[in-house]
Image (cartoon, rainbow, N blue to C red):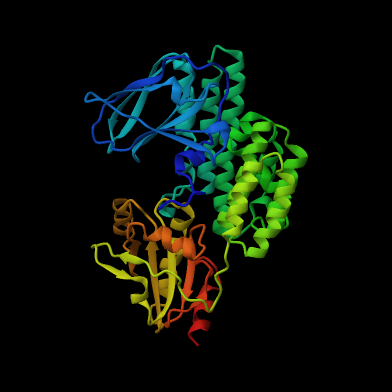
């Protein structure tokens, strides 16, 4: 199960967009070879008009020799930047333009790494764009596994060196307009990685990124009407400036962002993408009450009047919001299973105070809570009457088992049985993870949205519930 607001790491790092123009022709936009038969998932993806809520995915079919081709008909008429994903072993960037054929040959092995070589039309541009894509990978600078993280100063030093290298490569482009485009795009994407590093450090130190002068300097550089601001994702850093001094996830904070867009953003493509993004994020992360959802939609309906399709979509979402309160019972009892495949019901775990962690291996914030949970479990190992439980939302059981084997957590680990996660999350109005919940021994909910393990007061909170 993947919650819709969470994106693969590669697409978070590269919020794709389009530049250039053209018309559809009866031709091949991309062809090439993947010289390894151990890759199962081979996908082309791009964000339509730069909107990260509007991704298009195309399965790439190969013949027995590993050859493949993508026709013009599956890409936008104006062309698009796209990402090629090969399982978890590699991702590559490519510019696709109707009427021209880009050629990519991918070699290597999943264990040793995959590399791409470009030829055909726009080969120099594609080599550059792919280099930018691979270099500014979110997982390099803020990996999901905290044990793999670089210290802040090391990450920023690496970014500065890569920025210089990429800029030199940009200057070698013969086309002045493309040189200008990629120079700004690469600069902003590097800024976005710097923003992620600052946000990650702030998260770890329980501080506010907006108070960091370096973060403020990044925001000051952004022209919200520049296409590259949307395509690099820096527009979302810029949006945070609207919430300084308030809770960014509150109704007030989201309305402040809407007002900032209304006042400052004239780029039609960017306005549309942001008016789609804000309500999606609001309902996914804020976990609003029905009253808060109605308040938000009242303001949204007035400011997003140019996008009736969005108003209709999120009105339905708001109407489906329900509040899960302390004292409620679990409305859907899911089947869960252990690493060795044994199954049980969630209700089979009742009898102690349960502190449950709902997480997934593909969720970066979830993985960053694991070391905190490990410390909490160790601190409370002699406290009677409480049980710590982790339940994964992963569909990829191999990825989940590998993560559990690597971390070797000393508390029970489960994963939702097929289809059970979606049913449980919908029934309990859980729209985002990580999510922690405390359930009483009799199965009643005590804390539907409990503090995270990183919260300094979590141990005190749990002990108070045992008394």
Give the quarter of the image for residue 63: top left
Horizontal and vertical percent position of residue 162: 51, 31
Residue sitting farthest toward the left: 64
Q: Is residue 363 above or below residue 462?
A: above
Q: Is residue 443 above or below residue 27?
A: below
Residue sitting farthest toward the right: 263
Q: Is residue 242 visible?
A: no
Mark count: 0
Question: Which residue is rendered at x = 66% and y = 55% of the image?
Answer: 248
Give the quarter of the image for residue 273: top right
Horizontal and vertical percent position of residue 281: 59, 51
Q: Is residue 381 above or below residue 366?
A: below
Residue sitting farthest toward the bottom: 467
Horizontal and vertical percent position of residue 272: 65, 37
Q: Is residue 75 visible?
A: yes
Q: Is residue 49 above or below residue 434?
A: above
Horizontal and vertical percent position of residue 292: 67, 62
- Residue toward you, 258 or 178: 258
For residue 231, side relative to residue 43 (left or right)? right
């Amino acid at each position: 199960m993947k919650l819709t607001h969470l994106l693969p790491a590669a697409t978070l790092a590269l919020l794709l967009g389009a530049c250039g123009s053209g018309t559809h022709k009866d031709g091949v936009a991309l062809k090439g070879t993947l010289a390894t038969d151990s890759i199962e998932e081979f996908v082309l993806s791009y964000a339509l008009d730069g909107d990260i809520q509007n991704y298009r995915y195309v399965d790439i079919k190969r013949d027995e020799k590993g050859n493949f081709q993508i026709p013009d008909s599956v890409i936008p008429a104006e062309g698009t930047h796209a990402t090629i994903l090969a399982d978890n072993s590699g991702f590559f960037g490519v510019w696709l333009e109707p009427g021209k054929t880009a050629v990519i040959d991918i070699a290597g092995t999943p264990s040793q790494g995959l590399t791409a070589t470009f030829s055909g039309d726009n080969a120099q541009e594609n080599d550059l764009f792919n280099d930018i894509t691979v270099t500014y990978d979110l997982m390099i600078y803020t990996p999901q596994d905290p044990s793999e993280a670089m210290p802040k100063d090391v990450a920023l030093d690496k970014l500065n060196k890569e920025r210089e290298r990429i800029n030199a490569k940009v200057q070698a482009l013969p086309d002045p307009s493309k040189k200008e485009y990629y120079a700004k795009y690469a600069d902003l994407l590097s800024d976005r990685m710097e923003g992620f590093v600052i946000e990650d450090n702030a998260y770890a130190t329980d501080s506010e990124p907006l108070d960091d002068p370096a973060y403020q300097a990044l925001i000051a550089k952004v022209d919200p009407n520049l296409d590259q601001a949307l395509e690099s994702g820096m527009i979302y850093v810029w949006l945070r400036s609207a919430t300084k001094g308030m809770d960014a996830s509150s109704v007030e904070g989201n309305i402040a962002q809407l007002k900032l867009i209304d006042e400052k953003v004239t780029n039609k493509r960017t306005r549309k993408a942001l008016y789609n993004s804000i309500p999606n994020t609001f309902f996914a992360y804020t976990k609003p009450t029905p009253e808060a959802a109605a308040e938000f939609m009242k303001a949204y309906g007035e400011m997003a009047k140019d996008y009736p399709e969005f108003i209709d979509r999120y009105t339905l979402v708001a109407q489906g919001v329900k509040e899960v309160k302390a004292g409620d019972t679990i409305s859907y009892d899911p089947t869960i299973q252990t690493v060795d495949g044994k199954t049980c019901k969630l209700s089979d775990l009742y009898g102690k105070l349960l502190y449950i962690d709902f997480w997934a291996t593909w969720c970066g914030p979830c993985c960053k809570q694991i070391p905190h949970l490990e410390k909490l479990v160790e601190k409370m190992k002699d406290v009677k009457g409480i049980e710590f439980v982790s339940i994964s939302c992963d569909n990829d059981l191999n990825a989940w088992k590998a993560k559990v084997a690597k971390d070797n957590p000393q508390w029970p680990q489960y994963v939702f049985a097929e289809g059970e996660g979606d049913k449980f999350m919908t029934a309990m109005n859980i729209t985002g993870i990580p999510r922690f919940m405390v359930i009483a021994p009799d199965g009643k909910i005590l804390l539907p949205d409990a503090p995270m393990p990183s919260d300094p007061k979590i141990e005190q909170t749990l002990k108070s519930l045992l008394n």
